Image: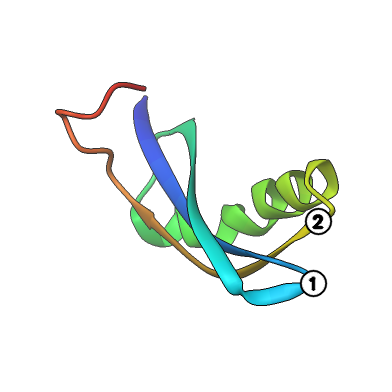
Amino acid sequence: MNLVDLVLTVCLATNANSCRTEHLYFEHNGSLMQCMFRAPTYIAQWTEDHPAFKVVRWKCKYPDASRDI
């Protein structure tokens, strides 16, 4: 299994100019394209846990080796 980094750009629901990046890591043994198809499930869960934020952009990538997870 490989780790995949689901990178979310999220903004406050009450202030679209207040945005930040969130990283969700999960194990996945498919391609990045397959990650894109599975991502909405993870995004929905994150959104449910963080109701003050709105996801405005997302992408899948392999994590940087230098980044602590």
Image position of 29 (left or right of 12): left
- The residue located at (59%, 68%) in the rendering is 18
- The residue located at (81%, 41%) in the rendering is 49
Q: Quickly name the residue at label 2.
A: 52
How far apart in space, not on screen, are marks 1 and 2 (Cα)? 8 Å
| Quadrant, the N terminus | top left
Point out residue 47 in the picture as x, y percentages from the top left corner: 76, 52
Residue nearer the viewer, 29 or 15 = 15
> 10 Å neighbourhood of mark 1: few (<14), some, or many (≥20)?
few
Residue nearer the viewer, 11 or 2 = 11
- The residue located at (78%, 46%) in the rendering is 50
Image position of 49 (left or right of 31): right
| Quadrant, the C terminus | top left
Point out residue 15 in the picture as x, y percentages from the top left corner: 71, 74
The mark total stands at 2
Which disc, if any, is residue 14? Answer: 1
Amino acid on which the number 2 mark rests in the picture? Ala
| SS at circle 1 | loop
Image position of 64 (left or right of 15): left
Which disc, if any, is residue 59? Answer: none
| SS at circle 2 | loop
Amino acid on which the number 1 mark rests in the picture? Thr
Q: Quadrant of residue 53?
A: bottom right
- Which residue is most to the left? 66
In the depicted structure, whether residue 53 falls above or below residue 49: below
Is label 1 in contact with label 2 (beta carbons under 8 Å)? yes
- The residue located at (58%, 54%) in the rendering is 39
Point out residue 14 in the picture as x, y percentages from the top left corner: 79, 72
> 10 Å neighbourhood of mark 2: few (<14), some, or many (≥20)?
few
In the depicted structure, whether residue 24 falls above or below residue 7: above
